[in-house]
Image (cartoon, rainbow, N blue to C red):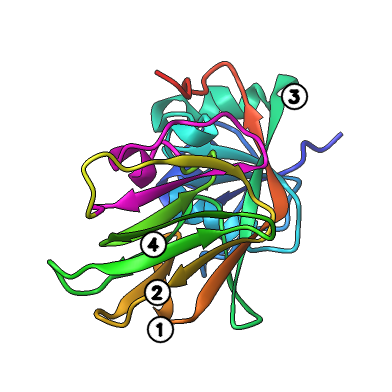
Amino acid sequence: MTTPSVGVVGDESVAERLSDDGVAVERHADGTVPETETVVAVGQAALSAVADTDSDPLVLPVDAGRGVRSVARESITAAVRGLDGARTERHYTLSITRGGECVGRTVWDTTLVTEDAARISEFAITTPTDTIDAFRADGVVVATPAGSPGYARRVGGPVLAPSPVAVVAPIAPFATNPDHWVVPVDELTLSVERDEATVSLLVDDDRAGTVARGESVTLSESDPIRVAVVAESRPRFA
């Protein structure tokens, strides 16, 4: 029986190493995601690319951060060979809508931030049933559990286990003791309340335009990605 190929995206050297070690590998010269049942995604950008496809592969993250229990490059062959016994974690992604139009899907985090240094704006956070808060700051970040060990952690947010919630954290707030919130992602809305500075919208670090005063950005739960957890996977909370 022929062993199914493993797709690789994000780093050609990882594909070559697996191939040299006898693993059947499929990769595309243009860097697109192979349509295989299992995909090795090297780095955070590669995992975001997998999430943007219409397929639903089992993903083995490599050097993609502890939020998705990724494996190290030096362990990749052993990790791939252990996929038959892998445990699966589901990491929910977020659909980002502005002005009724979907502008992206985030695996890690979505940020509103002023473009100019030393300029602040005012941001409001609401749900369909509650006003969470309004504050003056350089920006605000909303991170999925996968993204919670990243930038949101550096500005004081907690690290989350996989679940359909998000952490919301102000960036350099004009306050001495700011709150951080862990909230269900059910039409969570961010809006800009002042026009003193230009505010950029970033989706997984990719710029998706600007948000003017009175405009809002809505985050909704989207399809999860299935992440393989093997013996070589790094711990999330270490």
**10 Å neighbourhood of mark 2: few (<14), some, or many (≥20)?**
some
The range drawn in magenta is: 148-173
Front disc: 3 or 2 = 2
Marks 3 and 1 sit apart, C-alpha to C-alpha, by 49 Å
| Secondary structure under the numbered disc 1 in the rendered image | loop
Label 1 belongs to which residue? 212
- Which of the two discs, 2 and 4, labels the residue nearer the N terminus? 2
- Whether residue 2 is visible, yes or no, is yes
Label 3 belongs to which residue? 84
Write the residue at 39% across / 18% down: 238
Front disc: 3 or 1 = 1
Q: Is residue 28 left or right of residue 134?
A: right
Name the kind of residue labelled 1 in the image: Ala
Residue 166: % across, % down: 55, 44
| Secondary structure under the numbered disc 4 in the rendered image | loop
Residue 200's image quarter? bottom left
Label 4 belongs to which residue? 205
Name the kind of residue labelled 3 in the image: Asp
Front disc: 1 or 2 = 2
Q: Is residue 148 left or right of residue 129?
A: left
